Amino acid sequence: MRTRYNEVTFSNPFTLAGVDGVHAPGRYDIATDEEAIATPNHLAYRRIGTMISLRSATGVLERHTIDPVDLEAALLRDAGSGDAREPSG
């Protein structure tokens, strides 16, 4: 197993499915766990989990498991609309 780390940046407040609250603009650490899949000809990796590090209201750093599709959608909303929050209703 391996873990890949990267960073994403939100320019606007944002939400993520499965994570409570609206989160402030800024840089956020993303960790992606992958497991090795060995074949006779090569080694490949399959994603088994994606997590984002967020500060709670009390300032504690928490890791939340997220769907990478939801993260990508939030980043696209942020880049396109200037308002990355989910529509209400």
Image (cartoon, rainbow, N blue to C red):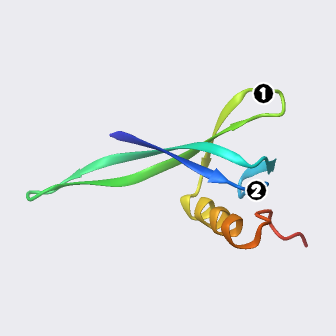
Q: Which mark is residue 89?
A: none
Residue at screen point 61% across, 59% down = 71
- Tell me where residue 88 appears, x and y as whole percent: 89, 69
* In the image: residue 77, left or right of residue 39: right
Disc 2 residue type (three-letter): Phe
- Relative height, residue 71 to residue 60 (above, below): below
Check the image and name the residue furthest to the right.
89
Q: Quadrant of residue 13?
A: bottom right
Disc 1 residue type (three-letter): Gly
* In the image: residue 28, left or right of residue 5: right
Q: Which residue is mark 1?
A: 59
- Tell me where residue 84 appears, x and y as whole percent: 76, 63
Q: Quote the CA–CA distance across marks 1 and 2.
A: 18 Å
Residue at screen point 78% across, 27% down = 59
- Tell me where residue 43 appears, x and y as whole percent: 18, 53
Q: Which residue is mark 2?
A: 14
Considering the numbered disc 2 on the image, is that residue within a helix, a strand or a loop? strand
Label 2: few (<14), some (14–19) or many (≥20) C-alpha neighbours in 10 Å: many
Residue at screen point 80% across, 62% down = 85
Label 1: few (<14), some (14–19) or many (≥20) C-alpha neighbours in 10 Å: few
- Relative height, residue 88 to residue 4 (above, below): below
Q: Quadrant of residue 74?
A: bottom right
- Relative height, residue 24 to residue 67 (above, below): above
* In the image: residue 58, left or right of residue 4: right
Considering the numbered disc 1 on the image, is that residue within a helix, a strand or a loop? loop
